[in-house]
Image: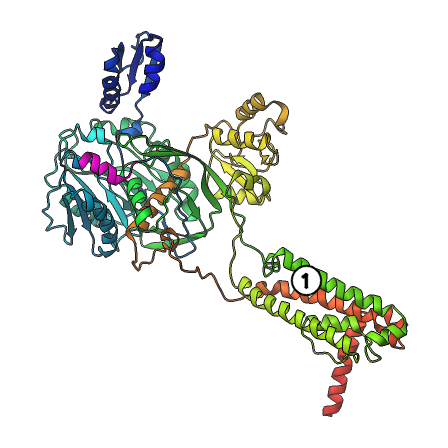
């Protein structure tokens, strides 16, 4: 930006304004100061205006102005997420991580440039009963630092929180491990920009924390004792977290305030809201921020998942009444910043760990606790979240690391059926070769069979009356009762038996492996794949697990859900000009839908304005599809999935060569085969029964065609279906007669 101002504004002698709007402007001043310091050499006339009240604003702009809006979510650099739903990873919960390289600076460079230059000590603090798996991570980081810089790093292991009396250094990275919660957690206490670190007191830093849904206040007290040990003798500490307590009748949403500032109080457990399971309503209606007016002066930020899912009996009421609050506490855009991306970058090189943020979620169990009762809801989430359009911005370590993505939710193609697995053992060229061999064999047999009697006897012999039927039996491994007498025919027969034996054995062995494994269809990896797979693009105002169920009811197998207008335009533009094969769904295309899945009428008009008559018109303009709702740039479901991803990245780092119920083989790229074999069921063999019926019918037709040598051929041709039953009946009667 400095270069742009110098090259354009100074060259054209244009005055430049900085207009700041927002209740808190201290963190913006750091940015402006950095810019003005650079520009002070050029004597550029810059005016800085602070706006507190827009209604009283009467300032006239200069020729150009830089407008910076102070968003609420920027007040805190990290917050505590309440994750109420517990996913059982053993049920095919799989995560693939891969990284797009950017110009971000690693944590090692940040430590070297700031901490070493300012002589700041750095702590690694480990808490929990098991810490061996965390040591691998710390060793990799300390090797890099101690090898060249001799950075004073202290590693503290905490076994008992009550006896904890260690004082923090200026900054700390805290690792936590416990069997109490469902996930192992990595805690990074310092998520601040280094430009802010220069202006704060040495002992003032952020403290972040994760918390699961807790049962009662006793668990909170235990958790509070752990935090209280860390907060001892730390002035200006800011701490906030949400906690859900599940009783028999209520789901209570609490907030723990652990601030040490004078205007915040030391500790308080404040009930924010309460959900009554009988009436299925929240007791309080949170419409604005006035309810938290007493928190002014404290650093606050709110974030939660896309909503609570309780038992099906309470599900509608919870989602309906929790929606207002969840929108209030959701952050407007997905961000990854601070040291967590830097640590993952180091782990990528040291632990064979690839790190970019993409979530691949298969079916699993949701475990829900209401009081003493446990509920398990088995549900498949056929969504694939992939960053087709990724923007990484990290020009220098003094600016926060963050990545913004346009997320595309793609429907999974499901698993291959048993009929589709029939062609898996061989590739296309092998199938073509097999088809040519069998076709040529039967063609030669039928041509010779229709020839003169001398040719038949010369090639087949006098005893061969059913050559095609015998060839079919050879292919399926049936022993021959009619063997040709000529040596040439015998040699051809031996080669044909050898050929059929190889193909039949290979097919049977490979087919057994395929039918005992659940094989998933490949997912699209690019926009070209979306076009080739005939995907339909749907713009959704609400992304939930009900979305895909309703879309499947409409028999829309391949579809992609985009949540932003930019992504929709980009996909449409890409599909329109190179090759318009990518289909788009608009309001009215599926009139039976009862949810707000498609773009609104205003978006449709906007598309018409951009691209002309290339878009289909709405079939029913009066269709009510909740189209008037404003589509958020990032839905809460997306934030929820990103939070799960961030926690699993964390757990994937700290769990290395460590036996746990969590399955992270795919994250750490451990070369161990995934065993998805299972016991065969009757449905797995249905393709075999169908194939048996088809081959049997073909064999009957071949047998009837070659029945010319029988005296009753003309009569039996009209009743050829009875021949197999008559032959079976003949064998049964003969066997019964012999026994008698």
Figure quadrant of residue 511 = bottom right
**For mark 1, does the 10 Å Cα neighbourhood hold few (<14), some (14 to 19), or many (20 or more) residues?**
some
In this orientation, does residue 280 appear?
A: no
Q: Is residue 727 left or right of residue 221?
A: right
Figure quadrant of residue 468 = bottom right
Percent of width and height locating residue 305 = 36, 40
The residue depicted at 74 percent of the width and 71 percent of the height is: 471
In this orientation, does residue 467 appear?
A: yes
Residue 114 in magenta?
yes
Percent of width and height locating residue 719 = 84, 70
Percent of width and height locating residue 167 = 10, 43
Which range is magenta? 105-115
The residue depicted at 27 percent of the width and 45 percent of the height is: 211
Position of the N terminus, as image quadrant, is top left
The residue depicted at 57 percent of the width and 21 percent of the height is: 609
Figure quadrant of residue 45 = top left
Q: Is residue 422 left or right of residue 141?
A: right
In the displayed structure, 588 sits above or below 307; it is above
Residue 671 in magenta?
no
* Extreme-front residue of the structure: 488
In the displayed structure, 370 sits above or below 330; it is below
**Pick the front one: 493 or 280:** 493
Q: Is residue 459 left or right of residue 655?
A: right
Q: Secondary structure at mark 1?
A: helix
**Pick the front one: 622 or 353:** 353
Residue on which the image places disc 1? 434
In the displayed structure, 734 sits above or below 168; it is below
The colour scheme used to paint the residues is rainbow
Q: Tell me which secondary structure the magenta stretch mostly adopts.
A: helix
């Amino acid at each position: 930006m400095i270069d742009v101002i110098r090259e354009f504004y100074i060259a054209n002698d244009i005055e430049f304004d900085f207009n700041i709007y927002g209740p808190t402007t201290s963190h913006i001043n750091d940015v402006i100061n950095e810019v003005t310091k650079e520009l002070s050499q050029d004597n550029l006339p810059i005016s800085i205006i602070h706006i507190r009240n827009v209604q009283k604003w009467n300032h006239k702009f200069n020729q150009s102005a830089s407008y910076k809006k102070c968003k609420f979510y920027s007040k805190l650099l990290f917050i505590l997420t309440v994750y109420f739903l517990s996913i059982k990873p053993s049920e095919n919960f799989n995560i693939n991580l891969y990284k797009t390289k950017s110009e971000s600076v690693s944590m090692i460079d940040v430590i070297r440039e700031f901490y070493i230059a300012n002589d700041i000590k750095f702590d690694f603090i480990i808490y929990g009963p098991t810490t061996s798996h965390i040591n691998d991570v710390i060793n990799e980081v300390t090797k890099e630092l101690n090898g060249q810089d001799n950075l004073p790093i202290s590693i503290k292991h905490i076994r008992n929180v009550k006896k904890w009396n260690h004082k923090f250094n200026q900054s700390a990275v805290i690792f936590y491990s416990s069997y109490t919660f469902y996930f192992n957690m990595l805690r990074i206490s310092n998520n601040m920009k280094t430009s802010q670190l220069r202006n704060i007191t040495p002992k003032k830093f952020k403290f972040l924390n994760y918390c699961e849904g807790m049962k009662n206040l006793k668990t909170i007290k235990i958790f509070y004792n752990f935090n209280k040990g860390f907060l001892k003798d730390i002035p200006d500490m800011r701490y906030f977290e949400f906690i859900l307590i599940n009783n028999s009748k209520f789901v209570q949403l609490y907030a723990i305030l652990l601030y040490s500032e004078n205007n915040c109080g030391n500790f308080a457990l404040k009930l924010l809201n309460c959900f009554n399971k009988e009436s299925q309503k929240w007791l309080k209606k949170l419409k604005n921020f006035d309810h938290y007016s007493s928190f002014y002066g404290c650093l606050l930020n709110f974030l939660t998942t896309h909503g609570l899912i309780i038992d099906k009996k309470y599900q509608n009421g919870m989602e309906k009444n929790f929606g207002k609050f969840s929108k209030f506490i959701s952050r407007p855009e997905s961000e990854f910043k601070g040291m967590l991306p830097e640590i993952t970058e180091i782990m990528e090189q040291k632990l064979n760990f690839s790190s970019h943020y993409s979530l691949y979620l298969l079916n699993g169990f949701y475990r829900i606790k209401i009081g003493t009762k446990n509920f398990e809801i088995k549900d498949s989430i056929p969504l694939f979240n992939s960053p087709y359009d990724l923007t990484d911005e990290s020009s220098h370590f003094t600016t926060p690391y963050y990545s913004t993505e346009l997320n595309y939710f793609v429907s999974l193609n499901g698993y291959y059926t048993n009929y589709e697995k029939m062609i898996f053992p061989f590739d296309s060229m092998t199938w073509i070769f097999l088809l040519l061999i069998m076709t040529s064999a039967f063609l030669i047999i039928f041509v010779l069979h229709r020839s003169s009697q001398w040719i038949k006897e010369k090639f087949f012999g006098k005893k061969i009356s059913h050559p095609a039927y015998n060839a079919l039996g050879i292919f399926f491994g049936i022993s021959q009762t009619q063997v040709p007498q000529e040596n040439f025919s015998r040699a051809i027969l031996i080669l044909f038996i050898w050929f059929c034996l190889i193909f039949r054995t290979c097919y049977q062995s490979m087919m057994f492996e395929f039918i005992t494994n659940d094989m998933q269809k490949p997912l699209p990896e690019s926009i070209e794949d979306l076009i080739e797979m005939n995907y339909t693009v749907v713009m959704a105002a609400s992304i939930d697990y009900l979305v895909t169920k309703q879309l499947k009811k409409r028999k829309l197998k391949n579809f992609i859900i985009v949540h932003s207008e930019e992504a929709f335009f980009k996909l449409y533009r890409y599909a329109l000009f190179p090759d318009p094969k990518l289909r788009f769904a608009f309001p009215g295309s599926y009139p039976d839908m009862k949810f707000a899945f498609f773009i609104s009428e205003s978006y449709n008009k906007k598309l018409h304005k951009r691209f002309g008559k290339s878009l289909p018109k709405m079939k029913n303009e009066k269709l009510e599809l909740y189209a008037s709702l404003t589509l958020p740039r990032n839905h809460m479901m997306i934030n929820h999935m990103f939070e799960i991803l961030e926690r699993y990245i964390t757990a994937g780092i700290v769990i290395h060569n460590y036996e746990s119920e969590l399955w992270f083989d795919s994250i750490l790229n451990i070369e161990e085969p995934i065993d998805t074999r299972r016991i065969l069921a009757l449905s797995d063999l249905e393709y075999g029964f169908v194939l048996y019926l088809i081959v049997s019918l073909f064999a009957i037709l071949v047998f009837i065609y070659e029945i010319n040598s029988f005296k009753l051929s003309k009569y039996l041709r009209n009743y050829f279906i009875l021949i197999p039953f008559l032959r079976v009946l003949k064998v049964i009667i003969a066997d019964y007669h012999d026994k008698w």
